[in-house]
Image (tube, grey):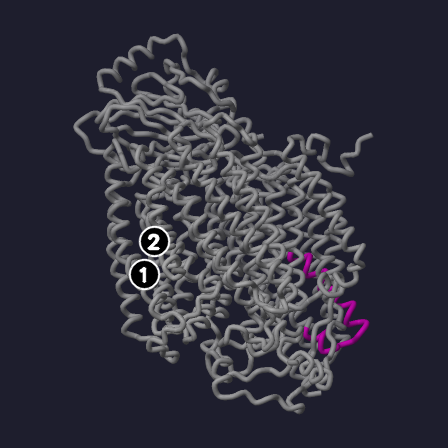
Amino acid sequence: MDWSWFIGRFSAEYLPSDPATIGAAIGMPLGIIAVLAAITYFKKWSYLWNEWITTVDAKKIGIMYMGIAILMLLRGGADALMLRAQTAVAPSGVELFDTDTFQQVFTAHGSIMIFFVAMGAMFGLINIALPLLLGARDVAYPFLNSVSFWLFFAGMVIINISLVVGGFSNGGWLGYPPLTGLEYNPGPGVDYWIWALQISGIGSLLSGINFTVTILKHRAPGMTLMKMPIFAWSVLVSMVLVMLAFPVLTATLAMLSLDRLADMHFFTSDGGGNPMLYVNLIWAWGHPEVYILILPAFGIFSEVIATFARKKIFGYVTMVAALLAIMFLSFVVWQHHFFTMGAGANVNAFFGIMTMIIAIPTGVKLFNWIFTLYKGNIRFTAPMIWFMCFAFSFTIGGVTGVLMAVPALDFQVHNTMFLVAHFHNVIIGGVLFGFFAGIYYWWPKVFGFRLHDASGKLAAYLWLGGFILAFMPLYVLGLMGAVRRIDTYSDPTWQPLFIVSAIGVGVIALGVVTMVLGAIYSIWKRKELADTDGDPWDGRTLEWSVPSPAPHYNFAITPQVTRRDEWWYQKKNGIKPPQKSDYVDIHLPKNTAAGVYIAIAAGLAGMGLIWHIWWLVAVALIGLIWIVLQRTFNDDTEYTLTAQQLYELDRKASL
Amino acid sequence: MTSHNTHSAAKQSNASLGLWLYIMTDIMVFASLFATYVILRHGTNGGPDASEIFNLELILVSTFLLLFSSLTSGMANIAARSGNARGALVWLGATITLGIGFLTLELYEFGELILHGHGPAHSAFLSAFFVLVGTHGLHILIGIIWAIALGDYISKKGLTPDGVRRLGLFTIFWHFLDLVWIFIFTVVYLLGAIT
Amino acid sequence: MKRLVRLSILPLAISGFIVLFWLLLKDVTIDVLQPTGQIAQEQRTLLIFTLALSALVVLPVFTLLSIFAYKYREGRGADYTPEQEGSYKLEALWWGIPIIIIFVLALITWSTSNSLDPYKKIESNNETVSVQVVALQWKWLFIYPDHGVASVNELPMPVDHPVHFKLAADAPMSAFWIPSLGSQVYSMNGMSSELNLIANKIGEYKGYNTNINGQGYAEMQFTARVTSHDEFERWVEQTRTSEETLTMNNYETLANPDTIEEPLFYRLGDTQLYDKILAKYMHSMPHTPDQPETHDHSMHQHGGH
């Protein structure tokens, strides 16, 4: 009997066959079953469902984003270890993985690190911190926020299913056609890549709208735009970029998938298609994406430095101006990703110069941070150490970035290990270090206790040391002729450098282990590390004015803002304890499972499209529309917390 | 009570800002598709180009259907604001009918093209054409579903503040689709007929 | 004592890294920094100049950061001024200086983008050699249309003669790069890109594909064999009499996805071969400036059904 109407193009040949994949294929489901069994055994299902899965509280959603991001950091990190292990032993004739696996692994590494680690950690920190920093009770659309998270989750699930069934794309993290087209790549791998990115990307797009409205409409009374903390500015700029760039990704991935599903000719070599168009479109998203990630990290550092230098941020106005300048410039530089595609000399020069100009506002930010330290009273806590490591690494990354912005130089380093080292330099040393600083900084606000500081510092040093060992050799290798994405090479003089690089990745792994162990230790010692007054760092902004962990309504009484660093000056001028009459009724969103259902429907539709199971696509899409309509026309989505209840809750929380 | 009123006013302004931002993102989607169409429209793969396949009379009819539907959706909005639930429903019904008419004509056009061997798989030009116009059509379909659900809601619950707010949002969305269509009409059909 | 240990960690770590990298690098050849062709030579000069210019920003950053971090750390109490808002003079300084540096760099970028444009012919008293490059899955085909020969994975070049490359692919997008000689360029289906290089030193240099194009991507390397002009001519003569002839027929076999160990050499049986390979994909491609005159007739009919 022919089952293909039911199972699409799935067949036994897509089941894992090599030992590494079989191991993952057995281990992953077993792990999931073990977790599910533990939840059942400890009777935590209703807790999980009521407190987490159906939550619309931005802080909890933020924690879930962070959790997934860290889990995916482990997965992407394991990928990195595999890649560098392979290149360390390659000339000795040892092949740890076959080429196809290797290519899938680096594609997965890139896709996971950008879409599920960096984006996940970014949205996690924004969810945790942004409403609190603004003096807001929640984001503008709490339900949409839950939808965004669960779509992100669905994308994450899809990318991990590919590990077990069918394999992943082998076309690199940006999947240039025609390599990812039907002609050269008919299997399900590229479709996994497309739909994991597409579904989580739509989640990101919705988040972009959500946070923009939150910033524009939900600031505490008195907080004008120019009184916002720099972090809020950085998020605003980043989210505007999300709204402008992610639709391009959505459209581009849709067209690529139509080439694959419906035999269309957008990016094919034949039929009049134009693969170069894809390269232009994907970078029209891809370059802003880099700034989408780095700007919130800049914002975090701005808060961290001001707090720990115990000083106002130096040059607030130029900081904002620099952010806006970067926002505009990030849209006129995308062509620098393919100077070698044969555009004219003047086109190349134009994009090269635009790229260099971005270095100006970025440099301004760096100098402003440095001068915030000037005449400060600096406490070198873990977040500050992350900043110091960032300043070192990011500056080097900036220099190599300027080098690559000169087209005539880019011709000699493009697509080599030099490029690989450069973007890790800015993404690890910039984005990740920024997010790590944010984790150590805001952790007490959501959990009520600080992270163990010394382990955080040690982790930062390990990351930086490992980073230098892993990537400085890659810069040299690039200049020696080592191109990116190779699993083997013939020149034995490359091997020592590749070995050092592999050791570097191992040191970074130690850094990750230190962070995880540090977190576990902190949970164990949470009584001693407890944050009793909600303000463990002697902070400057409003999030430190509420108790830790922050209550689900954030602020019992809406704060009135008169100036920047409101909380710092409130503390100086003496805080008046609130009167009972200050409390008013507030409206809060009810928990809802619609977000999860929407994501399940979207994920199933994605799986159907990957495997050509059309009935599943139809059922899932109809279900999706139905759930959205049900939710949209539901008027009963809020509940009221009376002034009396609020008063009692607040008294309890402050004790 | 006042707290509730300001709360609902805040919700209104929230929602309309969100919708405008959403429309901005949608404009980016269409911008990508327009750019793709303009770049690929000469990639005809030996098949027909834009001047050979379009039935301009048909397009003119569907353009008028959509323009009228924009008008009727505006009327529905006016009726709702003046508290005339019946009028709002009638005008909304007219909008839905006109929308369905538009979509039917579009499907007819697509069907004719495919029957003549000019399907989207034939050439880059046809892929770009089908996807650009089809994406607009998909938006129209979503709009129709939204309008039907809205009509169902208003007929059951009457003109609640939420209902009026939602109708207002729907109207903005529907006008936006009209605007996109004007661009499609110009860039795809008119310029196609000229060249 | 404890303080001494803490203070010495950083210098020790830095010296450790320096020693390690000195050990790693003392015996290796860094192609891009040890160029053997005029283009790569100019690119190295440009690289060093840009680095030096960047140092004008980097050194102040590192110095100020270290000094401030040390001087204003907690407990020193050195003139703590929490209310300092900023300083227009200082901020103007770090808008201004980078603007000047970037302005200088922009001028250089503009001029080198033109002078090192891969499409620009290299001026020389010696005659230019034409090579048509086709990236296959996963090997490089070099066609010498004026000499009537072709080779795979080996690129013989006469020293001090400019070489004009035309590049295309019959594979997913690939890229052609000889680090010792300079500039890489993408090669794509149905599109002809160009590159001009010159080798100024006799020797063998590695060439690579820098863009992933499938399974055999990492093995898709070739050797640029730079010889004296006489020797190059001898090679051409010898290859022209070889028994293997390359035409569209056996090209299709050659184009099958696989890798090869040893280079291959052919007499060129079809001087239009490169154009025919291009035309496989060029049927009504938009905006192709140098579409060849000869269309493959069978493609026409296939496309028009």
Residue B171 shows in the view = no
Q: Main secondary structure of the magenta part?
A: helix
For the N terminus of chain A, the quadrant is top right
Residue furthest to the front in view is C1
Left or right: B183 in relation to B79: left
Of the image marks 1 and 2, the number of the one nearer the N terminus: 2
Q: Chain of mark 1?
A: C
Binning the other alpha carbons within 10 Å of mark 2 as few (below 14), some (14 to 19) or many (20 upward) gives few
Residue beneath label 1, please?
C61
Q: Toward the viewer: A176 or C1?
A: C1
Is A356 within the magenta?
no
Q: Chain of mark 2?
A: C
Give coordinates of residue C99: x percent, y percent: 28, 61
Give coordinates of residue C246: x percent, y percent: 41, 15
Image-quadrant location for residue A445: bottom right
Q: Toward the viewer: A513 or B147?
A: A513
Can you say whether A19 is above or below C48 in the image?
A: above
Image-quadrant location for residue C233: top left
Give coordinates of residue C92: x percent, y percent: 28, 70
Left or right: A260 in relation to A299: right
Give coordinates of residue A80: x percent, y percent: 52, 42
What number is the disc on residue C286?
A: none
Residue type of the residue flagged with mark 1: Val
Q: Toward the viewer: A456 or A5?
A: A456
- Let me know if marks 1 and 2 both belong to one chain: yes
- Name the secondary structure under disc 2: helix
Image-quadrant location for residue A429: bottom left
Residue beneath label 2, please?
C11
Residue type of the residue flagged with mark 2: Pro
Span of residues in magenta: B139-165
As measured in the structure, the alpha-carbon distance from the residue carrying label 1 to the one carrying label 2 is 18 Å
Residue A229 shows in the view = yes
